[in-house]
Amino acid sequence: MATHFSRIRFDFLVGALLVLTGVSVWGQNLRYDNHREVAIPEYATIQLGPFHSSWAFLLRAGYRYVETTGAGTDFLFAGSRGRVKKDGAEYPVIVGLDMRNYLVIGPHTDLDVSLGLRYEYYPLDTQESEFRVFLPGEGINANLSMELSPVPYLRMRLWDAFGWQMDYLDTRGLDDRYGGQRFENISNTIGLDGDLLLAERQNLGFGASRGDRWALDDEWEHQSRVTHSGYLLYEYELAEYMILGFRTGLSHIDYPESERADTMINDYRADLTTLLTERTTVNIFGGYAMGTVSGISNSMEEVNTTLYGGSLQTRLSPDLQHGLSYAHGLRGGYTSSLEEFDLLRYDIRLTGEFSRWNAYTGWQTRDPSSMNVSGYTDWTSGLLCEIPILPAVSLVGSIRYSERSNDDKAVALGDPELSGDYDTWAYKIGSVVRLADELDLSASAEHIERDGDNDELDYTRDIVSVLLTYRHEL
């Protein structure tokens, strides 16, 4: 049951974690002591010398009924996205293989590759039968990491992260579970991070990376990009549980396959992290960012803004924790060159031995640098839960709500997602019955409703499914 629950994508929470990471991870403690050691992963069930792996075979079959009104959209079913060709009954058959592979290359070097394969068959042709590369994030992830210590008190990490993934994005580039277009892309980032322990309480950190993203469809070529980044930071441990840091960073974004202008962002920031209580960590930061856009006609545009924000994380009990974060900053835009943003997030999570609850809410605004792209406000909230009602039966459910409000200047634009406001409700309830250690029977009913100022945005969809799943760890 834990496996079933972990596959629910907490897209909103991921966004919150990214904000917390971006503003505070380098200031949590002196990073010289944070470099990990190569170790055999706990998930490994297969071992061949330095190779460790876990393989699982999956077979899922059952019944599904779909009914849609309005324009409809791509939808998420059984962990992957597809477009419904027609409403009605279906008897899907899904065969899969999940693999997590880990290779120990040397005392400080390892390779971690995870992927899943699926073939989905729809005999009544309500949806295209197809082969998918699948993960909870839909793709292949590989990470190569090597630790170096060329001289005493200096540690460096050389790493490469590869990804082949399918994202589902709305017109503004935000992840959209209940809409959005399929964006298949390959990415690779190589980087070097280092930490020099200047003294017992002082650390000098540095890093540089290059990230490439290639769109696999011509319609997405404007999202192919090359990003070069670098940073330098200094940390001082004021007290046992208090660290002050200063950081400067530089990033340059180039779009080689389109005529989009290059973007450069310089940022300067101070960060303070401390334990407020034994269970509460607080981080605050402030600084300044300067963004420069180089047009194709050698024209220059600048966007400057202050950086500020903070976060609070509390472990209320061993099973219960919550977090609050706020950030104001500057980033590269999806269609515009730069975006100034505000981002506020709160979530609370209960992870017990059997039951799990997760509630979240968040608000964000974006102000694009381009006058041809409107700004907007986005609010998203949700509740996800898993509750055991009998020793072998659990109730699972979720409620999600999102609301989009566009600036008035978007009225003149043709895209209904940019010119109109809309909100989306999604309800899902179901149960999972563990028939055996490797055999589950699940049933669920889901209702999705989107209502907007423009009729093109309106739709409802109801999905009822009963699925038998066999999963065997090899």
Image: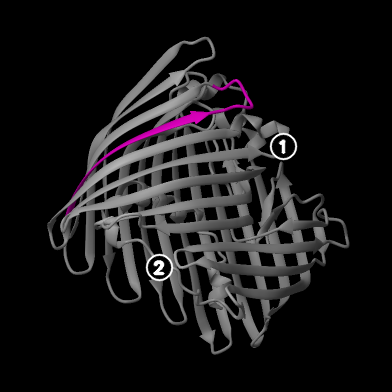
Q: Position of residue 356 (x, y in %)?
A: 45, 73
Counting the numbered discs, the total is 2
- Earlier sequence position, callout 2 versus callout 1: 2
Q: Residue at x 52, y 9 (%)?
A: 297
User: Which stretch did the figure color magenta?
Assistant: 243-260
Q: Mark 2 and mark 1: span between their CA atoms?
A: 39 Å
Q: Which kind of residue does numbered mark 1 sit on? A: Asp
Q: What colour scheme was applied to this rendering of the protein?
A: one colour
Q: Position of residue 405 (x, y in %)?
A: 47, 35
Residue 37 has which mark? 2
Q: Is residue 74 left or right of residue 176?
A: right
Q: Is residue 218 left or right of residue 129?
A: left
Q: Residue at x 56, y 22 (%)?
A: 260
Q: Is residue 236 above or below residue 371?
A: below
Residue 217 has which mark? 1
- Mark 2 or mark 1: which is in front? 2
Q: Position of residue 318 (x, y in %)?
A: 31, 77
Q: Residue at x 77, y 51 (%)?
A: 84
The question of residue 13 being in magenta is answered with no
Q: Nearer the viewer, residue 310 or 385?
A: 310
Q: Nearer the viewer, residue 341 or 111?
A: 111
Q: Is residue 277 visible?
A: yes
Residue located farthest toward the left when viewing the structure as drawn: 239
Q: Nearer the viewer, residue 31 or 109?
A: 109
Quadrant in which the C terminus appears: bottom right
Secondary structure of residue under mark 1: loop
Q: Is residue 318 left or right of residue 183?
A: left
Q: Which kind of residue does numbered mark 2 sit on? A: Glu
Place residue 457 in its image quadrant.
Answer: top right
Secondary structure of residue under mark 2: loop
